[in-house]
Image: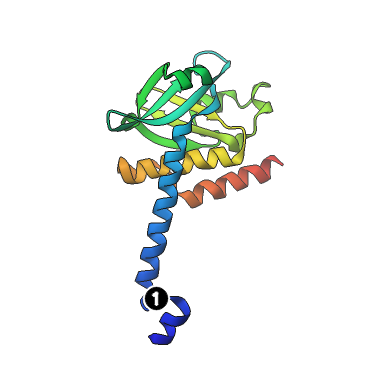
Amino acid sequence: NRCKYNTLNYIHMSECMEKKYLISLEYLKEKLEKLSTGYELIKFNFTSKGTTKHVYQIGMVKDQYHLLIYKTKNDLQSGKQMKVIPLTEMIKISFCCASDNLKKRIASKQFKDFKPWLFLSLHFAKRTIDLYFDDDNTVNEWFLGLYYYMWKISARKDNVPKINLFFFNKLKVTLLYK
């Protein structure tokens, strides 16, 4: 046991697993907190065939997390929200082109300019918000932050894809696309 502790810094595997769990928990929590800075993202409209560009932020309002939507970065700095949607109403998260809204648009010429692995859809009771991200890092941060929220804060683990599944499917779609 002394030799094992000197080489691996633990005697029982459960100690190691607990340390790694706490490290990953802190990592995911940081990702959720980073979403409070606000990101300019493209949203696919449901009723019309167009897209809109707004600033999206996850922030605390009255001790609860909300999705805050601003028209521009200036509105973000001044604090004038266009919409405030409580994250408690979020039912599930999907990625790539999994929402009904995005499936309808796959065949259109407008949709072909976008990379399918950079989509993330937030499903609420009466609506779906389909967001397009500029790069891989941003979509990863949003997924990991929302995963932490659904897993630890809202305790809705059943409707969230696993992290491994997210990255594996994203890799598959990227390879198929290329």
Q: Is residue 155 left or right of residue 69?
A: left
At 50% from the left and 52% from the top, the residue drawn is: 164
Asked if residue 158 shows in the view, the reply is no
Indicate the position of residue 6 as horizontal and vertical percent values: 44, 82
User: In x, y percent, where is residue 2?
Assistant: 39, 86
Along the viewing direction, whichever of 5 and 130 lies nearer the viewer: 5
User: Label 1: how many residues lie within 10 Å, few (<14), some (14-19) or many (20+)?
Assistant: some
Question: Quadrant location of the N terminus?
Answer: bottom left
Closer-to-camera residue (129/108): 129
Q: In the image, what residue type sits under mark 1? A: Tyr
Does residue 43 appear anywhere in the picture? Answer: yes
Q: Quadrant of the C terminus?
A: top right
> Which residue extends farthest right?
178
Q: Secondary structure at mark 1?
A: loop
Q: Farthest residue in the front direction?
A: 78
Q: Which residue occupies 40% across, 52% down?
A: 26
Q: Could you tell me residue 149's position as x and y percent?
A: 37, 41
Residue identified by numbered label 1 = 10
Q: Position of residue 113 (x, y in %)?
A: 68, 27
Q: Is residue 72 above or below residue 1?
A: above
Q: Quadrant of residue 148?
A: top left
Q: In the image as oriented, which residue stretches furthest toward the left?
A: 62
**Residue at horizontal 44%, vertical 31%?**
122
